[in-house]
Amino acid sequence: MSATDLRPTQMEFEGMGASEPGALGDEDTDLSILGEAGPDFDRSRSEQDNAVRAEAMREAMSDIANIVTRAAQSKEKLTRATIKAKFGRSGADDRPLVFVVIHALTTEQVAKNVEVAKEAGADGVFLINHDFDYPQLLPIIRHVRGLFPDLFLGSNFHTLNGADAFPILGRLAREGVKLDAFWADNACIDHERALPEQPMAAKILDTRASSGWDGLYFGGTAFKNPRNHVKLCRPVPLEASASVAATAAHYMDVVTTSGPASGEAPTIDKIQAMREGCKETPLAVASGVGADNVAQLAPYVDAFLVASSVQADTHNIDPAKLAAFMAQLSSAPGP
């Protein structure tokens, strides 16, 4: 125990019948050795109280994360039917879901584009950070969630896979910031390996299970990588499309693929093959889908993530283009 901890408080002085510290004893006693007890003691006590409260909060959040993790592990696997049921799709209304991808720049710009997506009847939005590193996206996510508490809100931390992203999502969840989905460009499915031999995908799955986050995982599979970025998917030949989708279905909620580059659609042969491989696991397409080809792809796909085909510019959605896309989708044949 330090000398500071041993200092008597003013209340203790008064309890001894003294109105002044000097009344403790000999009038000549030099009490300066005790220092200015009050402020220092109060500050120390306040710091200790804050530390105790912070530790209690950490323990409580850890308990919550464990509860969420156990709940996530016990959830039934998502299917084509159950993902659409989450959004009220049933019976004749069996069209694919639509999520608008917003290239985040500022909170105001994102909020404006969320309103455009909502007005058009989109099922939700994904925010992506093409213009800066992911930490700058986090305050935008917090702000948007505050403005739109009921919005289906997803994110893509550009080039980060789930092993890096799920702990971040878990921390946001413990703050009370709910993200409904995470989309990774690369779910790390190796098309040259058999199902049990997917060490990186398995690591991502384990990280997700222990993160305390329970949203939907859209995992990039046979996904675009025109610049051969080392953190993104390696090219998958067409003949491996069905098998890589079948493998991916074991590691994510929604198998998510694309064309060869932004704004370029996947071939119908690729989508048909991946549909076959996914079986009842949902399949999403995240590039090159517009009003001109959505009807062709819709029978095989459960969700579209749309951006370039409905943009006015890189950071803004064109309401007219999005409305045209939604109109074409409404008239497209079902699965």
Image: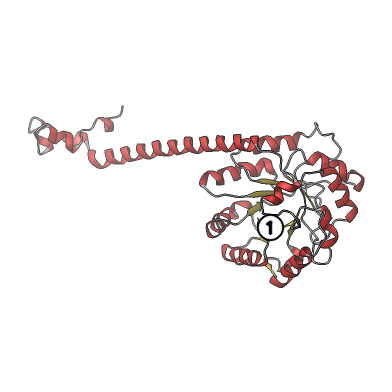
Q: Nearer the viewer, residue 314 or 238?
A: 238
Q: Is residue 277 left or right of residue 48?
A: right
* Outermost residue to the bottom: 320
Is residue 64 among the parts visible in the rendering?
Answer: yes
Quarter occupied by the N terminus: top left
Residue 189 visible in this rendered orientation of the protein: no
Q: Which residue is mark 1?
A: 130
| Res. 312 image quadrant | bottom right
Residue nearest the viewer, comparing 313 with 217: 217
Residue at the spot 83% in from the left edge and 40% down from the top edge: 246
Which residue is farthest left?
A: 27
Percent from the top left, x then y, of residue 185? 74, 49
What's the colour scheme? secondary structure
Q: Against 255, is 129 above or below?
A: below
Q: Where is residue 245 shown, x and y percent of the image?
A: 82, 43
Q: Residue at x 69, y 52 (%)?
A: 158
What element does badge 1 sit on?
A: loop
Q: Identity of the amino acid at label 1?
A: His
Quarter assignment of residue 214: top right
Image vertical order of residue 201 relative to residue 142, above or below: above
Going by the image, does 210 lie left or right of 266? left
